Image (cartoon, rainbow, N blue to C red):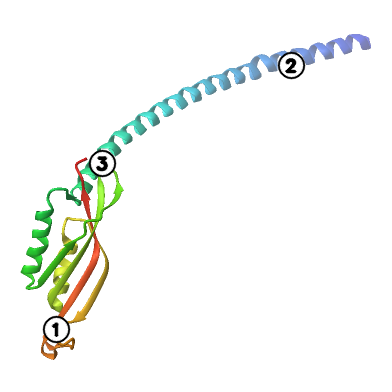
């Protein structure tokens, strides 16, 4: 029979052997597998970051191209400095096509909006049938030029005695006064 000291040594040896086997066959392989998974995750993270950077770079180039196209399109809505006659001729053509009398008053004051864009006050007076004035306004709205209308005043056509001419009112004749701004692009 073995004495209690030997039993204790055998028990400690058995537990130590079991611990060594546990460490050797379960814990060490698990640690190696975890280490390999961490390395794989790190490589995937780098690959994802690389792809993300490439995608963002591609988007910037695409956005830059889109912005250049937008700038060209925006530039086309402004009246170019020096083509005032073309702008006024266009407005006169619209009024004539709608059978209206028209007076255009471009103010000499300018307000710089930003960079090369300035706003110039404009006043347009129209006289003619109400429906034709509406058609005229619709045609102005469809122009490629950027014009803001701040106010529109419609009134019956008056004769020289400052009384409404009943015949003109029956025909739907009105006067329209538009106040607004037209935007110009300078070449500076």
The residue beneath circle 1 is 172
Measuring 13% from the left and 85% from the top, which residue is drawn there? Answer: 160
Please say if the residues under marks 3 and 2 sit with CB atoms less than 8 Å apart: no
Measuring 68% from the left and 16% from the top, which residue is drawn there? Answer: 23
Q: Looking at the image, which is closer to me, 23 or 126?
A: 126
Relative horizontal placement of residue 67, taking residue 29 as reference (left or right): left
Q: Mark 1 or mark 2: which comes first in sequence?
A: 2
Residue 2 in sight in this render = no
Q: Position of residue 71 (x, y in %)?
A: 24, 43
Q: Mark 3 or mark 1: which comes first in sequence?
A: 3
Q: Mark 3 or mark 2: which comes first in sequence?
A: 2
Q: Position of residue 81 (x, y in %)?
A: 16, 48
Camera-side mark, 3 or 2: 3
Q: CA distance from mark 3 to mark 2?
A: 67 Å
Relative horizontal placement of residue 100, taking residue 46 as reference (left or right): left
Q: Looking at the image, which is closer to me, 21 or 66?
A: 66
Q: CA distance from mark 1 to mark 2?
A: 106 Å
Measuring 93% from the left and 9% from the top, which residue is drawn there? Answer: 3
Please say if the residues under marks 3 and 1 sit with CB atoms less than 8 Å apart: no
Q: Position of residue 167 (x, y in %)?
A: 10, 89
The tally of labels here is 3
Number of the label disc, if any, that sits on residue 19: 2
Crowdedness of circle 2 by 10 Å Cα count: few (<14), some, many (20+)? few
| 64 to 142, vertically: above or below | above
Q: Looking at the image, which is closer to me, 92 or 1?
A: 92
Q: Secondary structure at mark 1?
A: loop
Q: Which quadrant would the N terminus be assigned to in this image? A: top right
* Residue 28 falls in image quadrant: top right
The residue beneath circle 3 is 66
Q: Looking at the image, which is closer to me, 105 or 182?
A: 105
Q: Secondary structure at mark 3?
A: helix
Q: Residue furthest right?
A: 3
């Amino acid at each position: 029979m073995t004495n209690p000291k030997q039993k204790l040594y055998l028990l400690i040896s058995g537990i130590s052997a079991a611990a060594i086997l546990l460490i050797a066959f379960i814990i060490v392989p698990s640690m190696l597998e975890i280490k390999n998974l961490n390395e794989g995750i790190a490589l995937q993270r780098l690959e994802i970051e690389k792809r993300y950077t490439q995608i963002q770079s591609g988007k910037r180039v695409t956005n830059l191209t889109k912005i250049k196209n937008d700038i060209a399109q925006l530039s086309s809505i402004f009246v170019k400095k020096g083509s005032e006659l073309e702008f006024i001729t266009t407005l006169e053509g619209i009024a004539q096509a709608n059978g209206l009398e028209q007076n255009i008053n471009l103010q000499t004051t300018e307000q710089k909006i930003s960079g090369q864009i300035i706003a110039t006050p404009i006043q347009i007076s129209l006289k003619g049938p109400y429906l034709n004035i509406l058609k005229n306004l619709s045609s102005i709205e469809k122009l490629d030029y950027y014009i803001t209308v701040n106010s529109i005043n419609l009134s019956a056509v008056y004769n020289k005695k400052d009384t409404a001419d009943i015949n003109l009112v029956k025909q739907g004749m009105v006067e329209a006064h538009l106040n607004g701004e037209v935007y110009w692009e300078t070449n500076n």
